[in-house]
Image (tube, rainbow, N blue to C red):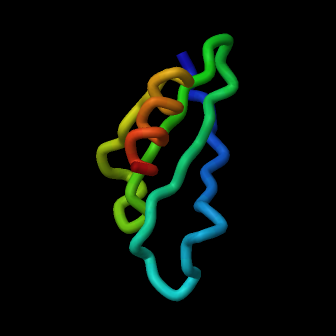
């Protein structure tokens, strides 16, 4: 199986002055999956969320 290429993006709140931010990509699969990685280590570990879990994560992070 060939891996699907992901289109990564950073938040508009992130500064372009430094590499200290996360990048997010949404896979185009049937069930949306959100991928999160550290911009300093793009080949490193990633977090993966279902779309519902991502919404819950963001709600918790905004508290």
Which quadrant holds residue 15?
bottom right
Residue in the image at 52% along x and 88% along y: 17
Which quadrant holds residue 5?
top right
Residue in the image at 61% along x and 51% along y: 8
Residue in the image at 62% along x and 13% along y: 31
Q: Is residue 56 above or below residue 12?
A: above
* Image position, residue 40 (x, y; %): 37, 67
Total numbered badges shown on the rendered structure: 0
Residue that protrudes farthest toward the front in the picture: 63
Q: Which of 26 and 62 is in front in this view?
A: 62
* Image position, residue 50 (x, y; %): 49, 22
Residue that protrudes farthest toward the left in the picture: 45
* Image position, residue 54 (x, y; %): 49, 32
Q: In this view, does 17 lie above or below 53?
A: below
Q: In this view, does 11 lie above or below 54?
A: below
Which quadrant holds residue 21?
bottom left
Left or right of 61? Residue 3 is right
Q: Which of 9 and 44 is in front in this view?
A: 9
Residue that protrudes farthest toward the top in the picture: 30
Q: Nearer the viewer, residue 56 or 8?
A: 56
Residue in the image at 42% along x and 56% along y: 42
């Amino acid at each position: 199986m060939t891996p699907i290429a992901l289109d990564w993006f950073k938040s508009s709140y992130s500064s372009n002055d430094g590499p200290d931010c996360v990048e997010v990509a949404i896979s185009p699969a049937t069930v949306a999956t959100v991928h999160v990685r550290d911009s300093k280590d793009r080949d490193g570990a990633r977090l993966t969320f279902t779309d519902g879990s991502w919404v819950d994560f963001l709600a918790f992070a905004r508290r």
